[in-house]
Amino acid sequence: MTTTRRSSIILTAALALLGPTLVGCIETAVGAGAAVGVTAMQERGVKGAVSDTAIRAEINHYWLQKSEKLFIYVNLQVHEARVLVSGAVTDPQTRADAIELAWKAKGVREVINEVEVTNEGGLGAYARDTVIVTELRSRLLFAKDVQSVNYSLEAVNGVVYLIGVAQDQAELERVLNVARNLRNVRRVVSHVLLKADPRRFTPAPA
């Protein structure tokens, strides 16, 4: 693992442990109005974004307690209390631990398991995935008739994972087409819900 990658992991771990407290500090530093303004543009709203941040922090906390492998090799996306877990691990138990611990977080409505057990990957794949994510975010930001703030994305070994809320089927198709046409993308997996989908409002299990 490179020094940059190791430093990034350590920094991310610190952010996860600090959680909402750090968010508050950042908002004070850069201007709470700007942060809230961007969040308010999302379909989940400010309250939903805060709840998702808390869920993410709690899951990351459980993962770090269990094993650093979970935090390094497993990706976490949270949108409207729906948790998408992806990544590439070398043993089934690591995958099982990631999913089980994700369900422990308060308020989680759904956990989607997209973790692969495989020996594929490495620094080369990680670099390509990073380029895919960066380029896709940029293209969606400037795409016509796409509200990019409502989408979360990750890439693992050339597979793009999407979660979020689409205004309608036409917008979702535009997003999928952009992702599919990126270099080195092998497949696109969508867990995006349409704005009017009743599943968006399903309460968390008791």
Image: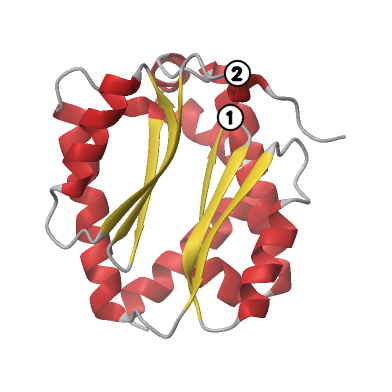
Please name the residue shown 20% across and 58% down the image. 131
- Give percent across and percent down for residue 183: 11, 58
Q: Relative to the observer, which residue lies in front, 27 or 71?
A: 71
Q: Are marks 2 and 1 in contact (CB under 8 Å)?
A: no
- 56 up-or-down from 39: above or below: below
Q: Find numbered disc 1 in the image and state the secondary structure of the residue it sits on.
A: loop
Residue receiving disc 1 = 80
Please name the residue shown 60% across and 28% down the image. 50
Q: Relative to the observer, which residue lies in front, 19 or 193?
A: 193
Residue 158 is drawn in which quadrant?
bottom left
User: How would you rate the neighbour count of disc 1 (Cα within 10 Å): few for under 14, some for 14-19, many for 20 or more?
Assistant: many
Please name the residue shown 21% across and 58% down the image. 185
Quadrant holding the N terminus: bottom left
Q: CA distance from mark 2 to mark 1?
A: 13 Å
Query: On the picture, is 101 further left or further right than 92?
Result: right
Disc tally is 2
- Give percent across and percent down for residue 129: 27, 63
Q: Nearer the viewer, mark 2 or mark 1?
A: 2
What numbered label is drawn on residue 198? 2
Q: Relative to the observer, which residue lies in front, 10 or 55?
A: 55
- 75 up-or-down from 144: above or below: below
- Give percent across and percent down for residue 178: 17, 39
